[in-house]
Amino acid sequence: MFTSAGAFSFLRYASLLLILLTISLLTWHRYGMNKIYALDPSRGFVYTAQDDREQGGASVASVDRRGNTIVLHCQLSKQYQWPFCQTAVDLAKVPKGVDLTGYDTMEFDASYTGPGPHSIRVYLRNFESEISTVTAEDSLKVNEVEFTVPEQGAMTVPIKLFRVASWWSGDHKIPLMHTDMRIDNVSKVEISTGAYVEPGTHTIEIHSVRFKGKWISQIQLIMVLIGAWVMFGSS
C-alpha cells in the first residue's frame, strides 16, 4: 500500500513522464510521422501521353522516361479552342481508386520549356458511384489545381487548393450536392499544360510527384493527449 509520500512521488513521476510524452509526440508530429505516396516510375507507375486530337485538335503529345524523370513532349496547335497536351498515370483500375484524403500536400518537382506562361494543371480524377461509370472515363470527377512552375522547379501545393473543375461540372450537368471536392477514391492523376498555353514546342520534365501527410492528424493526436491527461487527472 502506498503511503501519502509514496503516492505523491508516484504522481509526480507520472506527471513528468506524461509531460515528456506530450512534448515528444507533438515534436515528432511536427518534424516526422510522415507518410508519402510517390508516383515514382520505378514503383511501376506508367505515364501515358494524351492530347486534344480526340476533340478535333491538332496538338501532338508523347512521353518518354529518363531514369525516374518523365518527359512530356508537346507540339501544341491552336486548332482546338482549348488545346492541351498531358500525361496520365493510373493509380487503380476503376471503379477502384486510392484514398488521398489523409495527405495534406502535393510536392511537385518539374522543369518547363516552351513559349508563353509555364503553367501546369494537375487533375485528381475521383470515381464516385453516384456520378461515375466504369465505361466512361470522362465521368470521373475532375479535381484540379493550376500553378506556374517556378524556376527552381520544386513546389508544394496544399491539397485544400484543389477545386472541382466548373467546366466538367457544367458539361456533365452534375447535381449541386455532388460538386464538392472529393479525393477518397482517385483512379487517375493527370498533368497537363495550362489553360492559356501558346502554340509551339513545349517540354515538361516531371522529376517527382509526391503526396505527403501525417500518419495521424494533429487534431487526432491532441484529442488522444487530452484523453490521457483527463484519465491521469481523474486517477
Image: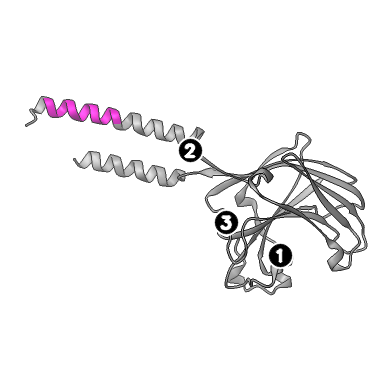
Check disc 2: other Cα within 10 Å, few if <14, some if 14-19, many if 20+.
some
Q: Secondary structure at mark 1?
A: helix
Q: Does residue 117 appear in the picture of this structure? A: no
User: To which quarter of the image does residue 11 belong?
Assistant: top left
Q: Which residue is mark 2?
A: 33
Q: Main secondary structure of the magenta part?
A: helix
Q: Which residue is mark 1?
A: 166
Q: Secondary structure at mark 3?
A: loop
Going by the numbered disc 2, the residue's amino acid type is: Met
**What segment is highlighted magenta in the picture?**
6-17
Q: Is residue 111 located in the magenta-colored stretch of the structure?
A: no
Q: Which residue is mark 3?
A: 98
User: To which quarter of the image does residue 230 belong?
Assistant: top left
Please say which color scheme the image uses: one colour
Name the disc covering residue 143, or none.
none
| 11 shown above or below 210 | above
